[in-house]
Image: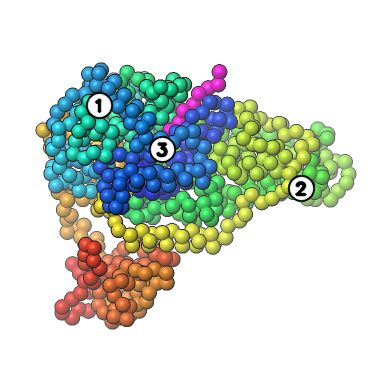
Amino acid sequence: MAKKFYITTPIYYVNARPHIGHAYTTIACDTIARRQRLLGSETYFLTGTDEHGQKIQRAAEAAGKSPQQFTDEVSAEFRALWDRMGITYDDYIRTTSDRHKRGVQELWRRIRDNGYIYKGSYTGQYCVFDELYVDVGPSEPCPECGRPTETIKEENYFFKLSVFAEPLLQLYTSQPDFIRPETRRNEVIAFVRSGLRDLSISRSTFSWGIPVPDDPKHVIYVWLDALANYITALGYRSDDDSNYKKFWPADVHMIGKEIVRFHCVYWPAFLMAAGLPLPKSIVAHGWLLFEESKMSKSRGNIVRTETILDVLGSDALRYFLLREVVFGQDGSFSFDALVQRYNSDLANGLGNLASRTLTMITRYFKGEVPYPSSSASRVPADDAIVKHAQKTISDFHALFESFQFSRALESAWGLVAAVDKYIVENEPWTLGEKQDEHSRSRLATVLYTSAEALRIVTALAHPVMPDATTKIWAQLGLGDIAKSSLADLRWGQLQLGTKVGKVEPVFPRADKSAIERMQMIEDQQRTASAEARPDPNEGRATEAAAGATTTEVLERRASSPGTTETPASQGSAPLNKPPAAAPSDGKITIDDFAKIELRVAQVKVAEKVKGADKLLRLEVDLGTEVRQIVAGIAEAYAPETLVGRKVVIVANLRPRKLRGLESNGMIVAASLEGGRPVLAAFLEEVPVGARLK
Ligand code: MSP
């Protein structure tokens, strides 16, 4: 019987449009799912969207749409992107679907009937952005993300989470692979050891959610609703639960590190309470950073996947993310690094190996894979490649199994480099000019060895780069790669006389203009969204720089005073979120303020930015230098009225690009609700360059 394999992505919130952070998780899961299929497992790959809760309800209101219409649209956008990328999901679950709602209510009943739900009342703070009960005082910001929290006073249902602390700790001990990597596991253990309090699992002051069975004025807490997707999609307790019976428990729940607590503490506790089997493994990866902080809509530093697909294609992105980012750790994204990797590893690496090997087989052997005719003509370098390839196969499998994608790819590309060197040293083009038997035999050996190594790298890389490897496989004359098997991949399977196909470049070299094009598309998108009305749930935050460890967060939590009077309020810091920039009273110190360099500057040049109705390009004099700033004030100020005017600028902002123009600083203006910006000015004469403090 075929091995079963079930893998899931988180279901993505539909308040924000998809970006490459979401694509990262989906790509990793798709790669694993493809590989499992090629290994012969019966594989089920689930993704979908998380569509309930206060955050989504507000985002819909802000967009002037009904929650259903809004979630329909954004969910379809996620799905269309995955389809465009050829993501091989087997099911796409939406939490607003009837099948999901029914399954969640069934799960609730099971937990309730087992005695783990009771009614109480909750008074405390709630962070809508994180959909999390937080343990802070009224008017204090969320210790997670720094956004304002809201006081809620509600009659709620509670889940007896506190009774699961011991069983959870036993789980982490008896199943060491339950949480991966090890660092996350240690953090979760420390968190649970510090004690668990019961958890509020319903809300009664808004309606966008799944009604609590038998008490429909409550809706089920969005995280209980969302986590249940992993079983509702399989038909848990529905008329057709065959997939549930076949695939549950999941082999891998893949998630980002900021939602570890929900998956490693709440989810297994809910399942234990319902008497259901637990997933085998929760694998948490790090964050994709852009411009040095976590890519997120509220920071405005997202990169859209479509931009990369348009310019370099999906395989380039897939390869880059899995090769460049050490899985489990944070990794930076930049267009420069993407293009550099593309050129070095794909255009000059695998692509070049494929085209030179296949071209020479076409030229010297009429397009048929040759076979070394005499073993007497073998040299140690030939055997070294065979050994190297065999080791690469076993290393690659082992590294992939332990989610070390970057090292796995590094090992395969080590073989590409070794074969390149082997080709250069053996000069098949010189051998090809000679007709003597020894030279022909050497040439056959060199080209067979190169082609066989190429076949092996192509097979290994197929789950990572399905499109390009499909082409190389066909050019090797091997037919449909999707029908090949990875399980018994080994040296020597390339058959003598295989007729190679037409040789075509698979990775055309990308020049500098590729970077510029991607940057330009993104700048246009950002300007467009900067000009759009802000989402009320976004952008208020002072999200701190990414990279804080859970331990730091938990330490802060332990040292923060105060508990609330209700049993529901969980500790305020979910695992792995960055500490908030502001201390708990929301105030900053004079030192914090001193970090912001406000200066008087005089406008020297002002002009409209082509194609951007709201932007002006300014050159401002700071006394010591003249700088370019791009400002969104074109609707309020005609450019000619600004020349000569003294303005206040934030002088030490990191430069960023808007519409392809570098903006080096920011002009300070009063921003009026629904109105136009009004520039800060002085009633008395001030010298250019003066600092405001
Ligand atoms: N809806 C919840 C998950 C419920 S799962 C039962 C949620 N959604 S989310 O839209 O915020 O998606 C979070 C996930 O998207 C992360 O856990 C991660 O998998 C992926 N990522 C989103 N931004 C990311 C980065 N900048 N970097 C890496 N992964 C990112 O949380």
Of tags 1 and 2, which is closer to the observer? 1
Q: Amino acid at mark 2?
A: Met
Name the secondary structure under disc 3: strand
Residue 575, image quadrant:
top left
Seen at 30% across and 67% down, the residue is: 666
- Asked if residue 637 shows in the view, the reply is yes
Viewer-proximal residue among 248 and 29: 248
Q: Give residue 213's position: percent from left, percent from top.
A: 25, 26
- Asked if residue 547 shows in the view, the reply is no
Q: Which residue is mark 3?
A: 48
- Marks 1 and 3, Cα distance to the nearest angstrom? 24 Å
Dot 2 alpha-carbon crowd within 10 angstroms: few under 14, some 14 to 19, many 20 or more = some
Determine whether label 2 and label 3 are within 8 Å by CB. no
Q: Which mark is residue 213?
A: 1
Give the residues drawn in magenta, as a range: 1-8
Q: Which residue is mark 2?
A: 360
Determine whether label 1 and label 2 are within 8 Å by CB. no
Looking at this rendering, what residue extends furthest in the right direction?
A: 436
Name the secondary structure under disc 2: helix
Q: Amino acid at mark 1?
A: Pro
